Amino acid sequence: MAKDVGVAEHGSFTAKDYRDPPPAPLIDAEELTKWSFYRALIAEFIATLLFLYITVLTVIGYKSQTDTAAAHGGDQCGGVGILGIAWAFGGMIFVLVYCTAGISGGHINPAVTFGLFLARKVSMIRAIMYMVAQCLGAICGVGMVKAFQRSYYKNYGGGANELADGYSTGVGLSAEIIGTFVLVYTVFSATDPKRSARDSHVPVLAPLPIGFAVFMVHLATIPITGTGINPARSLGAAVIYNQDKAWNDQWIFWVGPFIGATIAAFYHQFILRAGAVKVLGFIHKQLRCLIIIVKSHFFSLCFLAID
């Protein structure tokens, strides 16, 4: 990227100094021959495993600490609370994105990967393999939680995402769409190469706003869906918990995040980055060239007819 960015005189930045990086190929089979690709898959697997391990343990620990049944002697005001759970999710994303951004891009979420694929930031092969690695990592992470907290795991819901009582399916789906839009939009904004070219501190700070986005969305939507916004997180918990309610609501935690990621990708690429204007401008230029060619041929034919 540094080679593509010319530094203007006196450190100023103009549009001419920056060139958009070329889009990733739709299918790049050459990636399968590179160690860096498999290293990135391992990084996504381990990061998602650690993410689920810490966050689901936090959820179950909070529920066990606040269980006021006499047999448990819990304190209704004890535990980390919803605020603490939100911090656990946001904080872990901050840490893991910081650790893996230079290796795999630090996606840790199929919805983020899907959004970046739509924006042609990653190839289809990389996107699919990332999603597989993330889902497997999530399942293993929750499996570790069950192994360490077997006495509490089933009693406290296994950290699985479910639509809360009193909320309709439409409300739950909307919460997932909006929450994922906030997250993926933040990812695009924090990793925008044009901003990175202009402000050198942006790549360093990128994990911070992404972690805060996860934190804020959890504060808002934990009471509604338990906050998915990450299909791997929802799938991993559902696979290990394996109860009907978690599976019945599972589609919400895939459809919602993927729709939210799609909207965020479209908004950033075609509205904020004026992708639609560029496309229309290209089409306009092509049409003008076509009209000029047609006119020249038309006049040539007219002159030939006169002769």
Image (cartoon, rainbow, N blue to C red):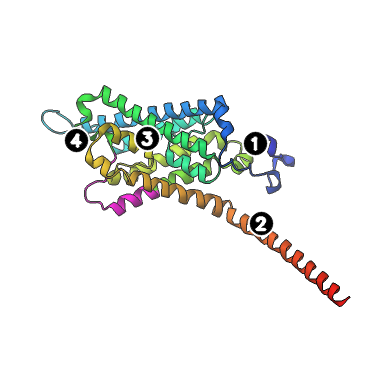
What number is the disc on residue 76? 4
Quadrant showing the N terminus: top right
* C-alpha span from label 3 to label 1: 31 Å
Mark 1: secondary structure: loop
- Confirm whether residue 104 shows in the render: yes
Judge depth for marks 1 and 2 and give the one in front. 2
C-beta proximity under 8 Å, tags 2 and 3: no
Q: Nearer the viewer, residue 105 or 88?
A: 105
Magenta segment: 161-178
Looking at the picture, which amino acid does disc 1 mark? Met
Circle 3 sits on which residue? Answer: 89
Q: Earlier in the sequence, mark 1 or mark 2?
A: 1
Q: Is residue 57 magenta?
A: no
Mark 2: secondary structure: helix
Looking at the picture, which amino acid does disc 4 mark? Gln
Q: Earlier in the sequence, mark 1 or mark 4?
A: 1
Q: Is residue 123 left or right of residue 298?
A: left
Judge depth for marks 4 and 2 and give the one in front. 2
Task: Classify 10 Å Cα crowding around label 3: few (below 14), some (14-19), many (20 and above).
Answer: many
* C-alpha span from label 1 to label 2: 24 Å
* C-alpha span from label 1 to label 4: 53 Å
Task: Classify 10 Å Cα crowding around label 1: few (below 14), some (14-19), many (20 and above).
Answer: few
What number is the disc on residue 282? 2
Residue at point 22%, 24% (across, down): 150
Looking at the picture, which amino acid does disc 3 mark? Phe
Expressed as whole percent of the image width and height from the top left, the position of residue 188 reads 52, 44
Q: Earlier in the sequence, mark 3 or mark 1?
A: 1
Circle 1 sits on which residue? Answer: 1
